[in-house]
Image: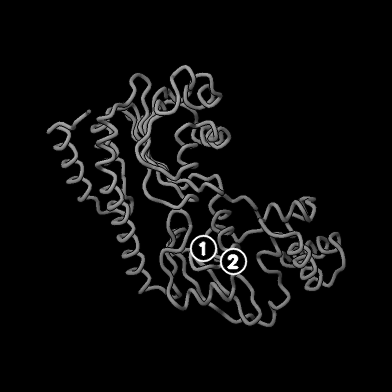
Amino acid sequence: MVALRHADFRGVLGFLRDAEGVTGADPFPSELLVRLRELIPCDVVWYCELDQPGRRVLVANSCARDGEADGLPPEEGERTFWRLKHQHPVCAYQGRTGDFAAHKLSDFLGRRQLQRLQIHAEFFRPNGVEYELELGLPAPPWHTKVFGFDSGSRDFGERDRLLLDLLRPHLVHLYESAKKRRLAVALAAGTEASGELVVLNSAGRIEFASTAARRLLHDYGESADGTRLPQTIEAWLVHDRRRLNGESLPPRGKPLKIDGKHGRLVVTRFNSDHRTLLLAEESIPASDSKLLSWREWQVLALVEDGKSNAEIAAGLWIAPGTVRTHLENIYAKLGVRSRTAALARVRELKLAETR
């Protein structure tokens, strides 16, 4: 039976003392990861939040022993991880059971067994990882929050597991405290802004929205359910950061405008922060009444790329029937009857604007 020593408890108390002094929006900044690496000796300690259905890394921060970890470039490492995640013993266990207590690779596989896996050859070994210990915070299965401790030379012991299980409720408290600080800052800033405030978490879910903001999201939303943004706004935030759809989007920093039956919803990112949005409703000038909506521009851009209705539906996460409806609305607004004519009419309009 392994027992913690007095030095271990002193280390935990020192970590918590330093953690309570954090005042920024990040619950686990680099200086706290350094302290965690001192408590749990390893080569690299990391914290990440993952969008599991979207296969996206939402938050990632790490601290290496020598200040900079060698290994796969971040984008290549991310692609490799998602491709081979099903072979990761700890991730597979977490996904199957929902148990995010401290577990290590060797709880499930011996070293030789691990080395036979493709994930070892393409992900662990290039990153210098032979042993790993993970601890997760309470979270829904679609938005996981996990700490990881990596080593290339020594496995982790029961002392390390006990320390992390002891720290876990305090790490949850630190996460919630940072959430309250972010919300307080956003609310204070929002009192000086023009528009209805919406504050998002790292997964893009709604942490706070004023009553008027929720009404607007409902009126202009395709799938607003109280915790998620309408799909159109979610896609805009993702594409605005990554610029995936080029000219079908408003220019960087410009608001998103969604036309409705009785008005137009204008969505802006407050101070260029993708977690804080301002919503405003305005009337549609008569001269703009035949302009395409942002979603219709998206559909038309994919038509120009030669995509079929099925491919457009898959790319925009909408039903094929919705694509047909968008195309019918586009034809009606442009006064045409076919895809080719719609593209030609748009080129005419763009040419006229430049004259």
Depicted 153 relative to depicted 73: above or below: above
- Expressed as whole percent of the image width and height from the top left, the position of residue 68 reads 36, 29
Residue 176 appears at what percent x and percent y? 31, 56
283 relative position to 326: left or right? left
Q: CA distance from mark 2 to mark 1?
A: 8 Å
Q: What is the x, y in percent for residue 22?
A: 24, 50
The residue depicted at 27 percent of the width and 36 percent of the height is: 36
Marks 2 & 1, CB-CB < 8 Å contact: yes
Three-letter code for the amino acid on which mark 1 is drawn: Arg
Q: Which residue is mark 1?
A: 228
Q: Quadrant of residue 46?
A: top left
Q: Position of residue 220 (x, y in %)?
A: 59, 73
Q: How many numbered circles are shown?
A: 2
What residue is disc 2 on? 223
Which amino acid, by three-letter code, is at mark 2?
Answer: Ser
Q: Quadrant of the N terminus?
A: top left
Quadrant of the frame with the C terminus: bottom right
